[in-house]
Amino acid sequence: MKKELFIERVLLFLALSSIGALVTITVFIFWEGIPLIASAGLKNFLLSSHWAPTRGHFGILAMIISSVFVTLGALILGVPLGLACAITLAEFAPERVKILLKPTLELLAGIPSVVYGFLGVVWLVPLIRDYLGGPGLSLLAGSVILGIMILPTVISISIDALSAVPDLYRDGSIALGATNWQTVHRVVLPAASSGIITAIILGMGRAIGETMAVIMVAGNALKIPTSVLDPVRTLTANIALELGYASGRHREALFATGIVLFVIIMILNLTASAITRRR
């Protein structure tokens, strides 16, 4: 009994340590960033696209729009491909193939983001520049790289959601004369929709929070993009590029940018949790 109680206390301490670390990080970010938002004004901070910290201008609208566009591009490219892979592996592929490919696809999540960025600079950027025009370092390049990077999240969680659908659903549909594809399309996918939506939301959070790969391929231009070939700077890229030399109000503005990112990602995670609980 004493041993079990000791283990229980240790596990409780570890859990509380994790929560304490999260709370500390949250308090620190808000403590550093809130003064700038209060002095500059929330409206000016969020709705102005003039970012010149040394001159007292702290508008991040261009970076918010760039982050949204890059994330949407990643979802447009990554979600259909990831969902198609998940359906194939969960419903149509032989078990031997599924056992081999699922862990292989999950290994993509372990590749450092700088490797994706390097491959994008070496292969993808020249292709865009030579065949589509523009500088190559662009919103399109960032979207393609992030679309690849979110594949492990979308595929893994979608496979788990599809596999959780009871076989009775499939057997009943086939017994009524439906084909395998009709069963997947009209029975399995609706039943697994909550898990698939969760996969998409978590993939969105992964994309919007990515830093290094986006810095390397997106061009980092401080402007609102008007074309997929325009260079852009995301919120995460702005923090990583400028925090090393920022001080004073400039540093506070970067922490305020972190608050915006923190709120966005928390909303996405809470939405995913709420959808999972409801379904």
Image (tube, helix red, strand yellow):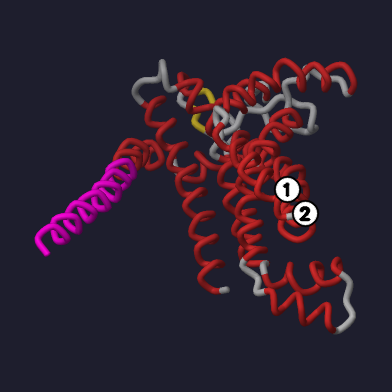
**As displayed, is residue 103 above or below residue 277?**
above
Q: Check disc 2 and report the residue beneath it.
A: 93
Image spot of residue 57 (x, y percent): 50, 28
* C-alpha distance separating marks 1 and 2: 6 Å
Q: Check disc 1 and report the residue beneath it.
A: 97
Amino acid carrying label 1: it is Val
In this rendering, position of residue 5 left or right of residue 164:
left
Q: Which mark is residue 30?
A: none
Where disc 2 sits, the SS reads loop
Contact? badges 1 and 2 (CB < 8 Å)? yes
Graded by Cα atoms within 10 Å as few (under 14), some (14 to 19) or many (20 or more), the crowding at tag 1 reads: few
**As displayed, is residue 18 above or below residue 120?**
below
The residue that appears at 36% across and 20% down in the rendered structure is: 247
Front residue of 141/52: it is 141
Q: Quadrant of the N terminus?
A: bottom left
Front residue of 78/54: it is 78
Where disc 1 sits, the SS reads helix
The residue that appears at 63% across and 43% down in the rendered structure is: 152
In this rendering, position of residue 133 left or right of residue 275:
right
Number of numbered discs visible in the structure rendering? 2
Q: Which residues are magenta?
A: 1-26
Image spot of residue 243 (x, y percent): 43, 22
Image spot of residue 84 (x, y percent): 78, 52
Amino acid carrying label 2: it is Ala
